[in-house]
Image: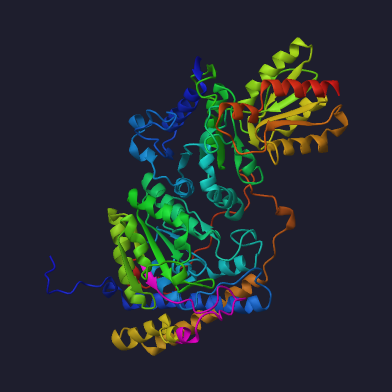
Amino acid sequence: MAVITYLEAIRQALFDEMGRDERVFVIGEDVGAYGGAFKVTEGLIDRFGEPRVIDTPISEAAIVGSAIGASYMGMRPVCEIQFIDFIACCFDMLTNFAATSRYRNGAGAPIVVRGPSGGGVGGGPFHSLNPESFFLNTPGLKMVEPATAYDAKGLLKAAIRDDDPVLYFEHKFLYRRIKDEVPDEDYVVPIGKAAVRREGSDLSIITFGAMVHTALDAAKALEADGVQAEVLDLRSLAPLDREAILTSVSKTSRALLLYEARRTGGIGGELAAIIAEEAFEYLDAPIMRIASQDAPVPYAPQLEAAFLPSVEKVVAGARRLVEY
Amino acid sequence: MATASEKPVRPSAALSPNQLLEMYYFARLARDVEERLVILFRQSKVIGGLYRSLGQEGESVATAYALERRDAVLPLIRNMGALMTVGVRPLEIFRQYMAKGTSNSRGRDLNIHIVHLPDPDANEPVIVGPISMLGDSIPVAAGIAMGARMRGRPRVAMAWIGDGATSTGAFHEGMNFAAVQKIPLVVVAEDNKYAYSTPIAKQMAITRIDERAASYGIPHDLVDGNDMLAVYDVAKRMVDTARAGGGAQLIGVDTMRMQGHAQHDDARYVPKAVVEEWAARDPLERFRKTLIQDRQTASEKDFVDIDRMTKEYAAKEADLAVDEPMPDPATVARGVYAGDDFAVPRVELVASPFASKPDLSGRA
């Protein structure tokens, strides 16, 4: 057991999996000698050599397309998208090629596509994206986003070992801010399982990624008012852990859906539908979404702060729900 | 060492009379399978569109014939000839077009969108059909050859692409990546004059399609696509070069799509004179003439026999497929994820009637 950062946990998972399975390789832009834009892949090339750490041209479609082809030959590619915003450049490869492959011909494409997501770091419109809702409507893909170092390592290992294409979103705000205990020995965090981060009886804050920490801070503030908020960390966005969602909401009778992507058409809409369809009779208040504004991600710190969800917004929303 | 006065030996000179007839057999079979599909289409038994390769069967066969048995092929809709050459049983094609529950995709996907991923050590080809976003095959082909090399079981990948699809970003990204990584990828770029209704002059400002390869540093050549032996010569040299570590290669094929984009398209946008000019250059007729008159390695009777054989075979296979069941609607959501596998990436492969003859042993 050692206390390590979220970023180090991701790097450890790559080292472990490449050491464990010679079919695993890393492919992306500047991932070799430079070690990646955020140094996630630092040291991999020294340990495993150039054929298994492939620096590519600026060509996301070639990164993901060649990974699909290599996976057909039994390899286990891990693609790095330098900033997850650029996943739009390989959207076609992911949604049309990889996601349909098993359904169409039984040809599984076990690739991992990972990259730094999320805002809060002054990245502006093209270095701050939370893209999960773009892919939520694409069966055949799995999606995960860890909130802790423990999950960062365990979910990446699970993603690499998974027989389907997995999108692994790592929140760049958490890279060096979050540290927790991570076992040295091998473990995986199963895809499709949420985790209760804080028990509570008055409302459920259902969230994931960096917003888990926002939710926990809000829960602490609410506790001073005597409001007990439960915080459910989804961890997997596809498939969703419906059972955990419904269990929590049927216990607290109030649902606050917190996500960092834009509000409209976001994952909160799907969560709200699941709750409305299957837990309607448990609800004591309307389902509430707290998300980013419906705008491109702005650059100036003052604008980004107004754009993103915050502890204050969550606390205010939770109070409204409890008082309903 | 060859001296300057010696003519380079054409790879096709090493093909036996039996192999030459086999090439004709595959091209003729491709045409007859498609003729049979036209009948099924008119009977409304083909569910989606029907895309003919009339006039392109020769280049499709001659390029694929340059491969070894274990190599990978990524055909497009007009590469029925390549599929016949690597041994896909025609029954598999009829099943796909008719969306049968027995088809490679279990009725989930259409026409030649088939996949065959054999055991890595099996002496069988890798086949990965296209998706409708056509340029996508190029990066995937590069990845197949790269992945096979990484696993220590190298294969050359051959991918076909039309003039229209060479305008896509995926084509460019895949070509450039394959060049940089020195991947054994042979791309067959078919200039068949039209992408749906768009003439090639609106597709690219260059006149030779193979020049697409120049900016990637990929060796390229342009060949008369309706001359099967000429196509084979270029393809064989490029496949050998790629296999020997020479990296990606591109063959430009000058040919003509003799029918519309699909059966619904009467191609009235193509000048009649152009069609007539190319009709006189039919690759099968030319090949036949070359073997009988120039090479004198085959007789008229050989071809009459093959024509009868392929026609009967295509009809029989179509009849078999017609009676097979459609997919069960209850299976609609199966096989989206692993653990509920439904479709299997395997097609039935068959040897041609010429394969058992001893002089074919070179094509392992």
Q: For this rendering, which residue is in front, B275 or A265?
A: A265
Q: Is residue B132 magenta?
A: no
Q: Quadrant of residue A310?
A: top right
Q: Is residue A188 left or right of residue A200?
A: left
Q: For this rendering, which residue is in front, B188 or B316?
A: B188
Residue B122 in percent (x, y) is at 43, 54
Residue A79 in view, yes or no? yes
Q: In percent of the image, x 62 and y 43: which residue is there?
A: A134
The C terminus of chain A is located in which quarter? top right
Give, as a single range, the part of the protein colored magenta.
B252-276
Residue B122 in view, yes or no? no
Number of residue marks: 0
Main secondary-structure element of the magenta-colored stretch: loop
Q: State whether residue B300 is above or below residue B257.
A: below
Q: In percent of the image, x 37 and y 71: which residue is there?
A: B207
Q: For this rendering, which residue is in front, A162 or A155?
A: A155
Q: For this rendering, which residue is in front, A224 or A157?
A: A224
Residue B153 in percent (x, y) is at 37, 49
Residue A220 in percent (x, y) is at 70, 14
Q: Is residue B257 magenta?
A: yes
Q: State whether residue B15 is above or below residue A82.
A: below
Residue B61 in percent (x, y) is at 42, 71
Q: State whether residue B342 is above or below residue A275.
A: below
Colour scheme shown:
rainbow
Q: Is residue A311 left or right of residue B12?
A: right
Q: In percent of the image, x 63 and y 21: which residue is there?
A: A213
